[in-house]
Image: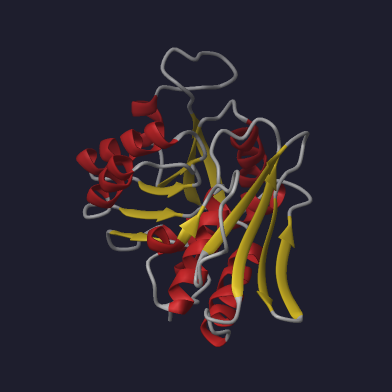
Amino acid sequence: MAQPPIRIAIAGALGRMGRQMADAVQADSRLALTARFHRPGSVGDGLVSRDEALAMADVVIDFTTPATSADLASFCAKRGGPALVIGSTGFDAAELADIADAAKTIPIVRSGSFSLGLNMLVGLVEQAARALDADDWDAEIFEAHHRHKIDAPSGTALMLGQAVAGGRGVELDAVARRVRDGVTGARPTGEIGFAVTRGGSIIGEHSVSFCAEGELVTLSHAAGDRIMFARGAIAAALWVSGRPPGEYDMRDVLRLND
């Protein structure tokens, strides 16, 4: 007997990703778009209140802002559901703590990128960092996005930084260099550098370069259409529905953590 479709609510429904997600959900027979909501006071265009949306959903897909996502996670936890797929980036420590606390009650998939290809890249970067000695190979992360992106480095760039640090067995915050300006001196051994571009309509470009004397290894990914993020969020929604409470990421969805 066929399973009933998973009921999906879209947060931030009037944003770029919110509209893209609604189209993608409606095109997937495994899902049913039951509600769309935006910030308080938003009306029309088929929108409902947050309370109404949560009551009609098995999973909420949320590409909004860090503060909104953290608040939504806490609210969902207090009412015992629904599950959450969070694609916002740029969280501060308090917001991450709120999400982690909510994940004790409900299942949450949170990722800096829902691109399936990008998440495969993260795994490859971690393998490369494990194999290439930090004493000999400098690591540099480059990312470029459209002019409207409000956080830097991107959540995806930080995922890649965490992958390098994880492969090397170090804490990213202890070795990250996010800005270089002026007379910076020689590069410290083991440093993980970040470079950021913001401009035009770039959807997303990321690369990690491992640089040694006489050779260079670069692993990269470029986004050509936001539909790839929607595909990944749908995969996450299908995976997280019915899961036990916990904070998961796309490595769990792709079974890279098995």
Depicted 237 relative to depicted 145: above or below: below
How many labels were placed on the picture?
Answer: 0
> Percent position (x, y) of residue 59?
42, 47
Q: Position of residue 120 (x, y in %)?
A: 61, 71
Q: Is residue 196 left or right of residue 129?
A: right
Left or right of 169? Residue 256 is right
**In the rendered image of this protein, does residue 212 appear above or below residue 181?**
below
**Residue at x-position 37% and y-position 53%:** 108
Determine whether, in the image, residue 133 is placed left or right of residue 169. right
Foreground residue among 70 and 156: 156
Quadrant into which the C terminus falls: bottom left
The answer, for residue 30, to whether it is visible in the render is: no
Residue positioned 78% across, 33% down in the render:
200
The residue shown at (27%, 53%) is 103
- Residue 207: quarter of image: bottom right
x, y percentage for residue 170? 39, 72
When the figure is inspected, residue 164 is found, relative to residue 181, above or below; the finding is below
In depth, the one of 242 and 134 nearer the eye is 134
Taking the spot 76% from the left edge, 81% from the top edge, the residue there is: 214
Residue 82 visible: yes
